[in-house]
Amino acid sequence: MSQEQVDESTANSQMIIDCDLHQSYRSPDEISRYLPKRYDYRGVRIPTLTYGNPAGFGREDALPDDTDDFEYAGSEYSKFKENHLDRYGIDYALLTGHAHFNINALPNRDYAVELARAHNKWLINDWLPKDDRFRGSLHVAMQDPEATAAMIREQGTHPDIVQILIQGGSTQVPLGDPQYWPVYEAAAELDLPVALHVSSEGEANTGSPTGAGFPNTYLEWHTTFPAVFMGQLASIIAEGVFEEFTDLKFVFTECGYTWVPFFMWRMDEEWRATRAQVPWLEQAPSEYIREHVRFTTQPVHAPERPHQFKQILEMMHADETLMFASDYPHWDSDSPEHALPNLPDDLTDRIYYENAAELYGLSA
């Protein structure tokens, strides 16, 4: 048996829920055909990513056979099935949509909502039926919280929709602000977690992708965008979202997680010193995180010494808060057998399957 076969055999013996896979479209027409007629003239027109990777974003094994354009990586289901789902024995795959579908960067509120709705119809009609393992994420437009809440109630009842998805770059103010609460109210009514995913930071009408302003290179952007998610998480906690919606869960996707222990310690310390500013918080911030927030594994930022990595997992209570994600088919995606090596079996089970199964109500 080859080493590759050994790796695949090992992966197939582990139950796996992959919490971040990006299905793409081969043509914008796949989305625009679901738009209302008033936007026939516009089609799919969204801000492009300012900070481009010089090597592209897709994997070669995810390309359709008739193209070498990495823009179309993830657009062919057979590649998904052969090179990822079947190869690694994935039990459930959460589709998070085209990664650069920057809805939250659009200034036109109505168009943003209708584009999100069209994207969701494409997901529900064109992708979810392809495979029993697929589960879906509704894209939402935070520019119009009331219209978005109505859309969630309309589309979120589909049995294979398991979460809503917000792009990390918010439009005007951080995502804990009460203006966004109608979105969270609708998600809570349908028992749908709210996922935040990297995308749209620094695009069009969103804010700077770093606390220092707009960087010069992709290297800087890709290194520092977790700071955007720290700001969003601080806002969600401090504004009392989890006191208002006591059963609501958030998932922080593709924004790293090795920063989580530092964040928990710092926000707890600041909260103890300034509790008068947030009298509505009944718990320490770290307790809200453990109860309400989950993080996905990709990208893995491992220190040089393995024992230090295990310490990070222990400090962030990874047995409660961490879920596996591959980020397939992107260039820096992680395969299940290499993402989190040499962990105890019980922790491996929690991260690769059980935490996500509990969050999304998925059974073996």
Image (tube, rainbow, N blue to C red):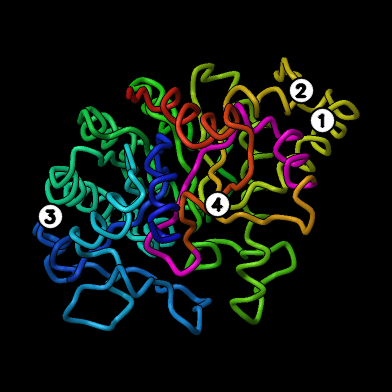
Do the residues under discs 2 and 1 have CB atoms within 8 angstroms? yes
Question: To which residue does mark 4 refer?
Answer: 339
- The local secondary structure at tag 3 comes to loop
Up-down: is 214 above or below 244? Answer: below
- The local secondary structure at tag 1 comes to helix
Image quadrant where one finds the N terminus: bottom left
Q: CA distance from mark 2 to mark 1?
A: 6 Å
Q: Nearer the viewer, mark 1 or mark 3?
A: 1
Q: Nearer the viewer, mark 2 or mark 4?
A: 4
Question: To which residue does mark 2 refer?
Answer: 284
Q: CA distance from mark 1 to mark 4?
A: 30 Å
Q: Earlier in the sequence, mark 2 or mark 1?
A: 1
Q: Which mark is residue 34?
A: 3
Span colored in magenta? 308-332
- The local secondary structure at tag 2 comes to loop
| Amino acid found under the numbered disc labelled 4 | Ala
State the residue in front, 312 or 28.
312
